[in-house]
Image: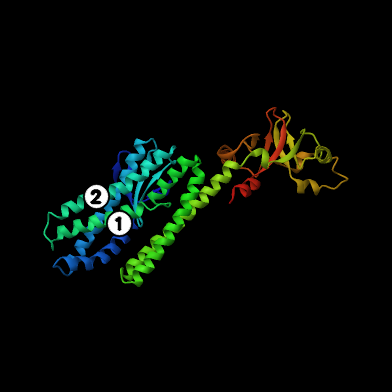
Amino acid sequence: MSALPGPTAGIRLGRVGRVPVLLRPSWFLVAMVMTILFAPTVRAWVDLTGPATYAIAFVFALILLLSVFVHEAAHAVAAAATGTPATAIVLDLWGGHTAFDAPSSRPWRAIVVAVVGPASNALIAVVAFQLMDLFQPGTVSRLLFAATATSNLVVAVFNALPGLPLDGGRVLEGLVWRIGGDRLRAALVAGHAGRVVAVGTGAYAVYAVATGEHKALSGFWMVLVGLLLWRSAGQAVEAARWNIRTEAAVVDDLLQPAVAVPSNATVAGALMSAAGAGASAVVVLDVYGRPAAIVDERAAAGVPAARAAQVGAGAVAEALPDGAVLPTGLAGRSLIQALEEAPAARYAVIGPDEIVVGVLDWEDVARFVTP
């Protein structure tokens, strides 16, 4: 499965082109579980007992690791070929993921990058099934090829399910994006579909254990996978909702009307100017006529009426940090990026003629974009 950037700590195994391959320590837990789960199958297929049984089971865990690596390497190669280079291949507790700095810029590119993962596992399954027939029943080689074929077929089918964060979810997202032209809405659809897949995974785990199709440990592991899918699908839904709201955020709609006063203005004069203009905020200009501070309404209200005509407006104003002046018309990602580059509680907003037209409060933006 694919993912956006995440922590890259782990054991460095090598590279696929320029993409580092990292093994997280959590994989060893997977190896232990797989060894325990596969050992009874080894005993049933091969006339072996004792430590040798677990040694062969561990070899199967290594084969699964290699299969996951091929899956993620396919993503990385396809991503590089379509203009969206990966930043890392990470093998971990849940299999693995390929990290990217940014998503694909076109629907078909996203679909291609997603499809090659399950396709690589399907190819491994086909090859393993063919090689299995070269060996006699009851041999270790036949067992390992049979297990490799079956496991890769399961991985291919499971990853093809249409819901995020699975590769099938990426394909669904790309198709909905291509048809509707809206990537964010497509991600929302694929995220909800991922929740359906997660519930289905958990339900199947309970059913399989109840009917004896799988043992309790296998069922427990599938439930954990279902919970992970639910969590990741939920994150995809929340991210899509946040992005949709972000795209709709416009400075002009969120600002508080403001009036500008000169640097020598008094509190009384500033409040009078605001009242006359019907503004709810006051921006104090510097000696060059540029926004320098925003009057703190509570501090201004605390100035005694008898002294309001003597106290300067700058004395009850919060200085604007560098970059805390925004133009009208700023919207969407550009707006969020501007706020991130110049963190501040409030921003002065100026029109095309450099005249102050309002004040933007960061909390108003946060409330707007929060689903």
Q: Residue at x 28, y 45 (%)?
A: 14
Compared across the picture, whether 128 is left or right of 277 comes to left
Q: Quadrant of residue 158?
A: bottom left
Query: Which residue position holds label 2?
Result: 124
Where does the image place residue 128, in percent across and percent down from the top left?
Answer: 20, 52
Q: Earlier in the sequence, mark 1 or mark 2?
A: 2
The quarter of the displayed image where residue 216 is located: bottom left
**Residue 95 picture quarter:** bottom left
Q: What's the amino acid at mark 2?
A: Ile
Q: Which residue is mark 1?
A: 154
x and y, in percent, of residue 307 in the image: 86, 44
For the question of whether residue 347 can be seen, the reply is no
Where's residue 274, x and y in %?
Answer: 80, 39
Please count the marks in the image.
2
The residue lying toward the viewer, choosing from 4 and 210, is 210
Outermost right residue: 306
Identify residue type, mark 1.
Val
Other residues around mark 2 within 10 Å, as few (<14) / some (14–19) / many (≥20): many
Decide if residue 37 is in sight here: yes
Query: What secondary structure is marked by label 2?
Result: helix
Label 1 Cα neighbours within 10 Å, binned few <14 / some 14-19 / many ≥20 = some
